[in-house]
Structure formats: C-alpha cells, structure tokens
Amino acid sequence: MAQDILDSSLNFEFWLNKAVAWGQATTLESQQDVCLHLPQLQKFLQQIYETLKHMDFPTAIQRFPLIGQLLGRLCWNPFVIGYDENQKILMWCLCCLYCSEPWNTIELEVNLWIRSLLCHLLSSSKLGLNEIGTVSQALGYTSPDYYPKLLKNMVLSLVNELRVNHLNGFSMGKTIPDKQIKAMSLLCIPLLTLPDILPLLEALLTYQGDEPKEILCSEFLEGVNESFLQKKIALSESAVLSLWLRHLPSLEKATLHLFENLISGHRSATPEEMECFIKDSLLPQAACHPSIFRIVDEIFWNILLETNGTSEVLTVIQVFTRCFVQAFQKNNDQLKFPLKSYFPYTSPSLIMVLLQNPKDLPHGLWCQHLNHISEILKKIVEDQRTQSCRSFFEHWFLFIHFGEWADIAAEELLMLRAESPATLLWLLAFYYNPQDQNQQRTQTMVDAAEAHGHIMKLFGKTPLSVKDLQTVADTRHPRIQRLIRHLLLNFLLLSPDGHKIAQEFIITQTDEIVNEFLNLIARTTYRWNHLGVETQRPGKLAKDLLQELRCYTMKSEFL
C-alpha cells in the first residue's frame, strides 16, 4: 500500500479525489487516511509549487485546470494545514496564482478567492476552535493554544525562507521569485494588525529583489505606513527605515502627519512634549540616512515658506533638529555618513559652528562663538552675487535649524555681555529678515539698534509700566517687529521688574502675538532646562509665566 501511495504522489487527479473524499476530516476513517498520506501529500504540494512559481496565471490554469479546487479543499482540512510545512507551501502556491495586475473579471474573482483563503490560513477568526479541536488534541495541545503556536511557527518558517532567499541572491539562485514576493505583500494587507504577522511584515520590508523597481506592492507599503502612524503596529527602526526608503509617499505622509499633530493636534504642547512626539515617530532616527533627511528637510522648507516662518513652525524645526543631532551623534559611528551629505549646499564651516552645543561651551565664550557665526554668514551674504538664490536661503534655513543660537544672541544683547552688540543684532536681523538687500539690511540694522537702545533704557525705568513696554512694541518699523518682541521677551524674563508685569503686557496683544510670545517663552524654558538654568530664578520665572499664559489662553478660548 505504501508503494501505491508513492507511485501516485505525482498524480494530480489522485490527490484531488483524496481531497474531495477527506473533506474537513470529520470522521475517524478520513482522519486516519489523511494522516497516512500526509508525507507524500507534502512532497506533491512542493512539486506543484516548484512548477507553479515559473508560470503566470493563464499558463497555470491551462496546465492544472482544477488547481483551485485542490488547493481550496486542502486549505480547509485542519490535518493537512497542521502538518509540518503544508500551510506555508499552500500559501506559496496561492501566491503563484495571484494576479498582481488582473486583466479581466475572472482574474479579479480569483484574487478575491485567494485573499479569502489566505485570511483563513492566517487569521484566528477564520479557523474556529471546533474545526481544529480534533487535530489539536491529537497533537497534544489544548484548543486555545493550538492556533497561536501554529501561526507563529508558520510565520517563522516564512521569515526564515525569505532571509535565506535574500542571502542566496544571485550566487545560489533564489527559490522565491520576485513576483511571488509581491503577491505575498498584497495578500498580507488584510492581516497587517495581527501581532503574530509582524515578523513577516518586517521581513518583507527589509527584503530586496533582483530588479531595480519596487517588488512590494504600493498598497502593502501604504497600509503598513498607515498602521504604523495610527499606532496599530510597532515596527523596528530598521523596518521603518526600509519602508520610507522604498516608498516616498509614505515618508511624506509620515512627516506631514507629525507636523500636523504638533501644530494642530497639540497646539499647547511644550517643546519637551514635542521632543517625545518626534522621537516616538522614528523620523529623526530614520533621518540619519541622508536620503530620508533631505526629503524631510524639503518638506520643512516648504512649510516654513508657506507659513511665513511662524514661531510654532520655527520651534518644531528646531526641536526636530535637536532630536536628529542626538540620533546622528549616537549612530554615526555605524552609519559613517559625513555632515556634508545632509546639507550639501551649505558651508561646512557654518555647519560645524552651528552644530556646537552651547552646553559644551563656557558661558563666557558664547559671544565669541556668536561672532564667529555672524562672520561666516556675513561673508556668505556679501558673496551672494556668485551664488544662486536657493543656495543663499539654504544657509539661512540651516541657521533656522539651529535657531537656539539666535535665542542666545537675543539674551546676550540684554545681558550686556556682547562686546559688539551690532554683530549680534545683525545675526537677529538676518534670522528674521533674510531677504533684505544691501540698502534694506542697512536700514534694518539702524532700526534694530534704535529699538535695542530703547529696551536697554527700560532697565533703569522705575516704576516700569505696561505703557512703557507698549511704546517700544509699537514701533514704526514693521520689518523688525518680531525682532523687537524677541528682545522684549528677554527683557521681561531677565529684568528685575519686567516679570512682574509680563503677563499683563502680553495679554494686551493680539492672539497671534500672544501665541508668538508663548512659543518664545516655551523655547526659552526648553533651552534653559537643557542648560541647567531651570532651577535658577530666571528659569522658574519663565516657567511660571508660561503656565499663567497657558491658563489665560485656555480660558479665553473657552469663553
């Protein structure tokens, strides 16, 4: 009898008749017959798969007209799919029949049928406990733990096969064609959020085909990205990097999703909270790859121009840059990407001085460092005739990334530590008005120096009133209004009497200006926190003022 089974192992009609006779193996006789034939059935299925993987759908149907009936019946037999690697082989066979680009209704219907079978093979909701009760007991499992172990083993087997196939490459010949990998990715779409499927998703994301074009279907990549953004699945950093490198629309969506959450969904988020959101998105970590960074940075650039550089947008860019620098310094020994690859159109010397962490410099050297930054930028501005407009603004955009130095410049101007206030004023003027031409920049500097002088006189004003502050704020020079507000904020935080009337002054402004002050204060407390100033008197005053203003704005919105 064993010889008869061996001889019939290659007989398609024999196995189809067996599948019909077995049904779902509900009787003792059918169960015994299934178990007797399982080893040879697996051998037959493996040979069918080796044949199918070299065919397209029309050819496969012409060669095996009843292949659908055979596979469909076997997929519903719990003894068949529970034996060794039968479940995995059946899945590969189904993938071979899947039409990645269906041309007619028949192929569309076949695709739907294959999807339903795959869901049945992988989804616990499709494989009820009553159906597997008999086979689970025979295998020594209780009903509740049979499916998870079966699914995990099958996924592990698929993952291992993908890895072996990827490592073999061209040297030994791949066992899984790229078209089959594409079909598998499409068939995984309904199952993306199943926890046990996660290793298979990651294996597919990190898999590279032979051809330069993408082998994973775009619907799969979009689905994985959407599930990741909605926190329905948790991917490793390497898988996320592969996803965004393979699929530009997913990277763009992830970047905009983060920005919208920080600006719209979390308007009251502090920079500390922003940092948590940003790191959790894995974008800074992925941006350690220059290709990812350049795309994310281009999106930031467009948002900056569209919003005219609002204080909120500046804060997001600066916090993101801090997170990126931390990830870059942590991973660069492994990645070995030079800084120039992230900022290819900017001066390497400017990159290095801006990258310097203020915390690593003594406070007494901050002005000297700011002078150095100003000198480099001035030289670039003076030489702009020999550069493209975009190249010029690339340097300004780089300065925006490291806007912490602009905040320090505004602070130093109020602390009388700058030997040359004009140099730091030029830095702030460039920060807020990069588009100024020679004559405009000269006038901006004159107006900024005049405003700075008025603010410095307020230190000796006793008693200090809101009207005194408003006189300075109501400048007749609209081009430097944001610069003046930046200086005024530092005056309110650093002067002995300024903090006493800070809230009273700020709430008299328009909602837009109040929001700008809120962002400036939040950014200041964030910076002071990193520099260890938070526990000192200015840090506590800034934190208290921020809290008071937040409460005020919340009440105003409610009313």
Image (cartoon, rainbow, N blue to C red):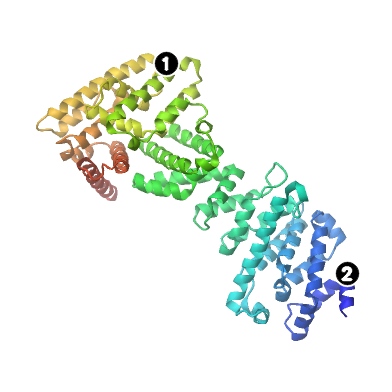
> Mark 2 belongs to which amino acid?
Asn
Q: Is residue 119 visible?
A: no
In this picture, is 66 found above or below 482? below
In the rendering, at what x and y percent does residue 76 appear?
Answer: 72, 72
Residue under label 1: 382
Q: Residue at x 47, y 49 (%)?
A: 281
Give the camera-side residue of 115 and 33.
Answer: 33
Q: In which quarter of the image is residue 11?
A: bottom right
Asked if marks 2 and 1 touch (Cβ < 8 Å), the reply is: no
Q: Is residue 175 visible?
A: yes
Q: Quadrant of residue 432?
A: top left
The CA span between labels 2 and 1 is 83 Å
Residue under label 2: 11
In this picture, is 542 found above or below 197? above
Specify the farthest residue to the left. Answer: 462
**Secondary structure of the residue carrying numbered label 2:** loop
